[in-house]
Image (cartoon, grey):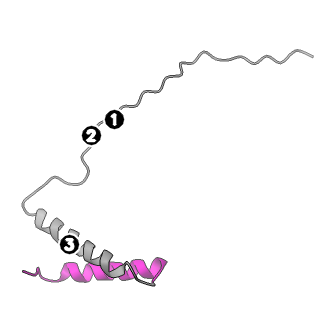
Amino acid sequence: MLPLLLLEASMPSELKIVLRETQTGREATPWLDPQRDKFIRVAKECKETFKDSRLKGEAKIRAMNAFMSQRLREPERP
């Protein structure tokens, strides 16, 4: 029986990480900014409304979606 030899391959133990700044989302546009502002406001209202909710899982998601779509369809309040 031949002896078992463990051979180490001489691979460099070097890891290079390249970071680059990548913009997420769409760029700012005059017509899109008011929609973003409204969505942010409604999302905060939704969070406050459902933070103490007893709903769980799918029922909570459906209720939150209904809340968001109803509020986003309403005309803008002054």
The residue closer to the viewer here, 31 or 34, is 34
Q: Position of residue 60 (x, y in %)?
A: 42, 80
Which residue does the numbered mark 2 point to in the structure image?
21
Q: Is residue 4 left or right of residue 38?
A: right
Q: Residue 35 lies in what quarter of the image?
A: bottom left
Q: Main secondary structure of the magenta part?
A: helix
Q: Answer yes or no: do the residues labelled 2 and 3 have beta carbons within 8 Å?
A: no
Compare marks 2 and 3 and give the one earlier in the sequence.
2
Residue at horizontal 10 percent and vertical 57 percent from the top: 29
Q: Which mark is residue 19?
A: 1
Stretch in magenta = 55-78
- In the rendered view, would you say 66 is above or below 30? below
Q: Residue at x 32, y 81 (%)?
A: 49
Which amino acid, mark 1? Leu
Q: Mark 2: which amino acid?
A: Glu
Q: Name the residue: 79% across, 16% down.
A: 5
Residues marked 2 and 1 touching at CB (< 8 Å): yes
Element class at badge 2: loop
Establish if 40 lies above or below 53: above
Quarter of the image where one finds residue 61: bottom left
Picture coordinates of residue 14, whole percent (x, y): 49, 23
